[in-house]
């Protein structure tokens, strides 16, 4: 194996080194944007050489800032301090959430740390405004999600709504899903029990969640739509959702999913213009489904650690020392407790209730037979005792 000169030169590029260190595509996108926002805010007068004054290319700005920070860490810290203070003003003016500000600083810290540049971060953190203890947004209600389904004429939209509300994953997950990430579970009669869903395949943060039988049935309908548009059923490696009305398979990414959701929630009156002084909608466009999932899982009495794992949350060492083997889907019985709570359609909920009643009736009949058999056995024993 031979290391090329180009490989060595790339290792001296602080921006490329930073990009290569980020494994998640979604984190990379966010970090690139936030770091670029900071670098373009740095006054060009701090850099040596007039040729840099009009430079706006992020890679070059990153190189210049890294060189400056190595040469003069105190000046770099002063720039960071001024930046955080400007961001804090936005919080005070109600233009930014106090909980959001750290997200703009994390990429800067990651950039400097991966390039071996030390900054006294504790003094920077002390400038942060007090974070809000609770977010001021709420979950969608079941009635609102029912209204969404009623105004949908597109099977794709219904798949998005039912999978999002019953799976509880983040909207960025649509950039990862393929058909092989869905493992359907069926009853003896062929009906759906539900399905396991792998979130963030190929990413170190991957995890399993589940979706309801209702979502499975809609996904089966979507398969037929897929075939009608492409002439064949989707392959395991095909994206779970594709751009509609095209024979060519092009992934419908999370930005497209958000546009669809935006149209739907506006139809039911949930996305009107924000009143003066309000920065956030009452229900966040995609996160409202994740909050709904979390709420329904709690109401169903699902084990807390299982619920957190199904949402991709790390709870202490739980993610490292699994209580279950994920590939065996041993968490599914816990998820099944929540299926009646996560089912949206009134007809589906009624069907679940009827099935539960039938199962209870069958169980009662079985118990009655056992009791009858026990009484007969007792009577036989009594007769035997009297004779002897």
Image (cartoon, rainbow, N blue to C red):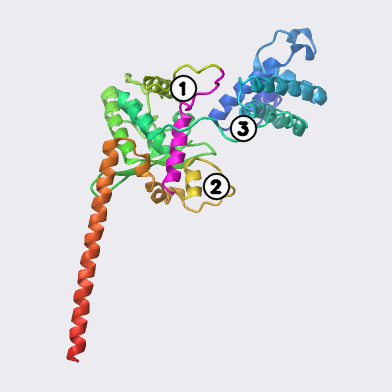
Which residue is drawn at the image coordinates 42% and 41% (left, top)?
A: 296
Task: Tell me whether circle 2 and circle 1 mark residues in contact (CB < 8 Å).
Answer: no
Disc 2 versus disc 1: distance between alpha carbons?
Answer: 29 Å
Q: Which residues are magenta?
A: 277-301
Q: Quadrant of residue 238?
A: top left
Q: Which residue is mark 1?
A: 255
Q: Residue at x 28, y 26 (%)?
A: 225
Q: Earlier in the sequence, mark 3 or mark 1?
A: 3
Q: Earlier in the sequence, mark 3 or mark 2?
A: 3
Q: Which type of secondary structure does the marked residue at label 3 adopt?
A: loop
Instruction: Tell me which residue sits at (72%, 16%) in the image.
Output: 42
Residue 342: percent from left, percent from top: 37, 40
Q: Residues within 10 Å of mark 3 (few under 14, many from 20)?
A: few
Q: Are marks 3 and 2 in contact (CB under 8 Å)?
A: no
**Residue drawn where x is 65% and y is 17% of the image:** 58
The residues bearing labels 3 and 1 have C-alpha atoms spaced at a distance of: 28 Å
Residue 319's disc is: 2
Instruction: Label 2, secondary structure: give it.
Output: loop
Which residue is tagged 3? 132
């Amino acid at each position: 194996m031979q290391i090329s000169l180009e490989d060595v030169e790339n290792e001296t590029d602080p921006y490329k080194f930073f990009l290569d260190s980020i494994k998640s595509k979604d984190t990379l996108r966010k970090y690139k944007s936030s770091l670029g926002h900071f670098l373009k805010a740095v006054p060009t007068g701090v850099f040596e050489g007039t040729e840099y004054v009009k430079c706006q290319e992020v890679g070059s700005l990153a190189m210049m800032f890294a060189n400056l920070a190595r040469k003069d860490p105190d000046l770099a810290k002063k720039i960071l301090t001024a930046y955080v203070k400007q961001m804090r003003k936005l919080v005070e003016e109600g233009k930014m959430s106090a909980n959001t500000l750290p997200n703009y600083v994390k990429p800067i810290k990651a950039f400097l740390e991966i390039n071996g540049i030390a900054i006294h971060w504790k003094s920077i953190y002390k400038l942060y405004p007090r974070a809000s203890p609770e977010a001021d947004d709420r979950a969608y209600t079941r009635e609102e999600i029912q209204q969404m389904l009623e105004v949908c004429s597109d099977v794709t939209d219904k798949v998005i709504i039912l999978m999002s509300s019953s799976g509880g994953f983040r909207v960025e997950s649509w950039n990862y899903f393929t058909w092989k990430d869905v493992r359907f579970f069926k009853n003896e009669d062929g009906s759906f029990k539900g399905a396991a869903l792998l979130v963030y395949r190929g990413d170190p943060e991957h995890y399993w969640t589940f979706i309801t039988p209702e979502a499975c049935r809609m996904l089966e309908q979507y398969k037929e739509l897929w075939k009608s548009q492409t002439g064949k059923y989707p392959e395991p490696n095909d994206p779970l959702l594709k751009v509609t009305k095209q024979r060519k398979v092009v992934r419908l990414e999370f930005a497209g999913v958000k546009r669809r959701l935006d149209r739907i929630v506006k139809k039911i009156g949930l996305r009107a213009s924000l009143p003066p002084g309000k920065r956030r909608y009452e229900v966040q466009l995609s996160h409202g489904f994740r909050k709904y999932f979390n709420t329904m899982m709690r109401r169903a009495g699902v084990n807390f650690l299982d619920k957190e794992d199904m949402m991709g949350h790390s709870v202490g060492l739980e993610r490292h020392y699994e209580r279950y083997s994920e590939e065996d889907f041993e968490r599914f019985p816990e998820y099944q407790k929540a299926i009646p709570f996560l089912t949206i359609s009134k007809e589906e909920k009624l069907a679940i209730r009827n099935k539960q009643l039938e199962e209870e009736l069958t169980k009662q009949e079985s118990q009655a037979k056992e009791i009858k058999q026990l009484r007969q056995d007792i009577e036989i024993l009594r007769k035997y005792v009297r004779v002897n």
